[in-house]
Structure formats: structure tokens, C-alpha cells
Amino acid sequence: MTKMNAFYAQSGGVTAVINASACAVVETARRHKNKIGKVYAGRNGIIGALTEDLIDTSRESASAIAALRHTPAGAFGSCRYKLKGLEENRAQYQRLIDVFKAHDIGYFFYNGGGDSADTCLKVSQLSETLGYPIQAIHVPKTVDNDLPITDCSPGFGSVAKYVAVSVREASFDVASMAKTSTRVFVLEVMGRHAGWIAAAGALAADAKTDLPIVILFPEVAFDKAKFLARVDSMVQKYGYCSVVVSEGVKGADGKFLSDQGLRDAFGHAQLGGVAPVVANMVREGLNLKFHWGVADYLQRAARHVASGTDVAQAYAVGKAAVELALAGNNAVMPTIVRKSQQPYKWTVGVAELKDVANKEKFMPRDFITEDSFQITQKCRDYLAPLIRGEDFPPFKDGLPAYVILKNVAAPKKLPAFKL
């Protein structure tokens, strides 16, 4: 077997644990030096491959790579860039081959969500369509938890934990002030089409912590009158109420409540700002004082409160990706397989990329209560183990000590390429 170099890149919105997957890819590759040469990282995702902007990870110490496991966000830079079909932009695919050839790259590891799985699938087909041998393995990552087949998506558990903790703490705050001040707090969380993150907000309340929480899911058409009635009843009973709303909530007309009329690089509606929309409904409809907040980047960057389960799974899929490639696999993705619920046990499986790319996993209807404002016990049982366990980063002077890599560029060998 000829020793080839590997290419690793991060794509889409980053997470608190995506670097744990990066750590696993590099560390596992280093343990197989007889089969894998250098690991090059794409600066800013697939764009780094197209522009030949490669980072030589061999220039990083073992301790720096190990520190990635507890460092949030994308250490090599990410991007929202989706390759078009081969016939639509053959030049880009030829460019990828040219870069791979120039740097002896035979392994491609792409760490991202559904759109990234599509890019990885297209790259995997290069050997067949353009005659270049490349093994492409997708490393799953998405805070939205909407990748199919895998039981959960690395990155989600930590966001779920952050949201559950935040809703619990904010609810305690509102309860303290409700007599003379704020009665309703609205928290906006991520989730374009799937309400997994919003659902996690319901974990803030349990048998020992009775909190009035209303969840708004994108899978359920928003009913203003029904929503206001629920908030009113909660305030009447408890004196206050917390609302968790997914950014992707839609009205009965199918339009996002927060659609700004803009599109991102993938062509998706650019969302944001549903919290004030919902909060104003509360003010106008119930005349209650409110506060609202948007978790935004905070929810996906909160490595200080990451789920221990999530960190372990993120590392496991990165390690498995390299092992799958070395075993001769192509166009596949390592998955999380839930083996048992009580006690919670999981292992790593594998899925074909053709069954993953451009597909979304939504909240099952039996995970949402009949009234549409809370989660069922079945959903709670699914979510609970994903937020368990602590994996704190090291702290120095009161702040988490995260690593910033040197990210030394590999010498370029080809002429410049215009995207």
C-alpha cells in the first residue's frame, strides 16, 4: 500500500466539540505513519483545497493537537461553500484533483453537516469520474442534530446542555423578579427545520425542579392565539414563564416568523430575530413585561459547559473516520449507535453517504406533546444521556485555556485558482 497524505477540513457552523474530532483525526493518523504521511488541513474548509491554502499539521506539537480536544470552534477555519455538480463546474473538480496530486493526498476527511456530506460524496466520486484515487470519509457534526441514520450528531449534546442550563438559570432569575418586574423571558435558539435544540430547553425542568417552560418547535405551525393562552395560563399559575423558540418556527402560511429575506451561501433563508417577534406578541396580547435573548454563537461555542458524552462521541467519530479510510472504505460516515438506554451505552457504526447527503432528521411527532408546547417522556429519555457528564477545559486566571494553533501554510505548488 502506497503511503499517501490526508486532507482534513471543517465545514459549516462550528461547535464546541468539532475540534475534538479534528484532534482525533490528526492523532489517529499520526499513529499510522506507515500508511498516512502528513495531514493537511484546509484553511477555511473546502475553500482551502480549491485555493491550495493547506495547513501543515505536522508543524504542530503533540500537546497542541491534544489541546484541540478541549478547544471550541474551528481551529483551521470553516466555511459555508457547497460544490456544484460535476457538469456544472467541472473546473472546480479538476482543481481538487490537481491539488490532491500536487500534495500526494489520497484521503479526504470532511467534518460537517448535511451539506458537507453532499460535498464529501461528490469528492468521493472523483476516482470514478475523473480517474483519481481518493477515499472520502464524512465526519459528522451539527448542532442541529438533523443528520439521518446516526442516533445523534456530535456537537448537539453540548448545545443541548448549554440551552438546558441557561433556561434553568434564567427561569430562576425571572422567578425572583416576577412580582414587580419581568414576567416572561424568551430565549431564541438555533434550529432551522428541526427543533432538537429547542426541545433541550425543556430539560431545564424536572420532577425536582418545577419550572413553567413553553417550547416552540419548527415542526409545528405556530398558532398565536394558542400560544398566548398557554403563556397566560403559566403566568397565572406560576407568576412567570420562560419561552424557548427555535429560529425556524413558521406560521400556518409556511413562512418563517424571522425570515429576513436574505440567503446564506447554501441558499438557505438567513434567520434570526424571532425572539423579539414572539416577545412583542406577549406584550401586545397579554400586556406583560418581558425580556428576550438570543443564544446565537454562545450556544455552540460554550466548551466550558460541554457534555462529556458529546466530547467522547466527537472524538470517537474522528478516530473512526481514519480507521474506516485505512480499511479501504469510501463515501461513508461513522455514526453513533445507541446500544441501550438504561444504562446508556453507545458504539460507532457506519452509514453510506448516499443515505446521508441532503437529508434531514426532524423531531418525531411522538417526541412533542399533543398540545405542541412541551416534550414527551420518550423525548426526555432520548435527550437526557446526551447532556450528561462534564469535560471541563483547563482554566487559567479564571478563564478557560484554549489553544491557538500556529497553522503554518504548506508551500504552494500550483498557479492561483479563482473561485
Image (cartoon, grey):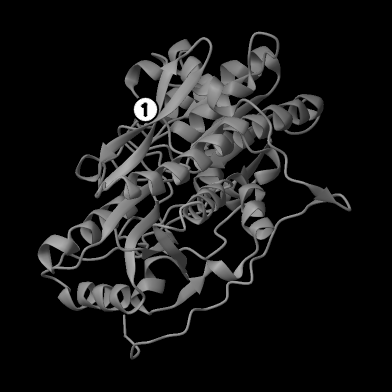
Q: Tag count in the figure?
A: 1
Residue 295 x %, y %: 60, 45
Is residue 91 visible in the rendered structure shown here?
Answer: yes
Q: Residues within 10 Å of mark 1 (few under 14, many from 20)?
A: some
Q: Is residue 171 left or right of residue 268?
A: right
Q: Which residue is located at x 60 percent, y 44 percent?
A: 299
The residue tagged 1 is 363
Q: In what quadrant of the picture does the C terminus appear?
A: bottom left
Q: Nearer the viewer, residue 221 or 36?
A: 36
- The answer to which image quadrant residue 94 occupies is bottom left
Q: Which residue is located at x 68 percent, y 38 percent?
A: 305
Q: Nearer the viewer, residue 366 or 403?
A: 403
Q: Nearer the viewer, residue 288 or 36?
A: 36
- Reply above or below: 48 against 19: below
Q: Residue reaching furthest bottom? A: 415
Q: Nearer the viewer, residue 376 or 352?
A: 352
- Reply above or below: 397 against 252: below
- The answer to which image quadrant residue 147 occupies is top left
- Reply above or below: 396 against 364: below
Residue 3 x %, y %: 35, 63
Q: Is residue 246 left or right of residue 115?
A: right
For label 1, the SS is loop
Q: Which residue is located at x 41 percent, y 60 percent?
A: 36
Residue 144 x %, y %: 44, 41
The amino acid at mark 1 is: Met
Q: Which residue is located at x 77 percent, y 46 percent?
A: 394
Residue 133 x %, y %: 21, 63
